[in-house]
Image (cartoon, rainbow, N blue to C red):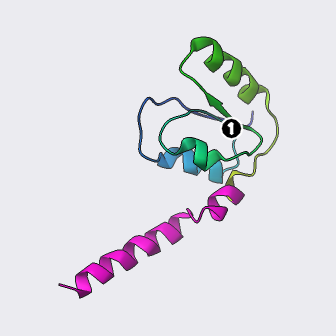
Amino acid sequence: MRLRFVCYLQSEGSPQALKEAMACNCPILATDVADIKHLLGTLDGHYLCSFEPADVANKLSKALADGRRTHGRERIVELGLENRKVAETILGIYNNVMAKL
């Protein structure tokens, strides 16, 4: 069975687990909170749901039935959110601040 990822949150900043699932090209079901809609973009195999039980059930059925490999990893790269790039950016900011002290 192919891996799928469900991210049912009512509040969140920018969920790292969702980005990791995208990097694995897993079909994803997620609630539309924080930057999730932006992260997923318009990629096939990623489903946004409301908090209504019928919508969650409908989109979950679709995600479970979806046998396609998604292009989540490409989206992560497009957004510049690969772990190494994010770490380098944070380190650059840190070094810049420390140089001013």
91 in the magenta segment? yes
Residue type at mark 1? Leu
Q: Is residue 101 visible?
A: yes
Is 36 situated above or below 30?
A: below
Q: Residue at x 31, y 82 (%)?
A: 95
Image coords of residue 12 (percent x, y): 42, 39
Q: Residue at x 56, y 50 (%)?
A: 19
Which segment did they paint magenta? 74-101
Relative horizontal placement of residue 89, taking residue 46 as reference (left or right): left
46 shown above or below 71: above
Residue 100 x %, y %:
22, 86
Q: Which residue has dot 1 on it?
A: 3
Decide if residue 21 is in sight here. Answer: no
For residue 26, side relative to residue 81 (left or right): right
Q: Secondary structure at mark 1?
A: loop
Residue at far left of view: 101
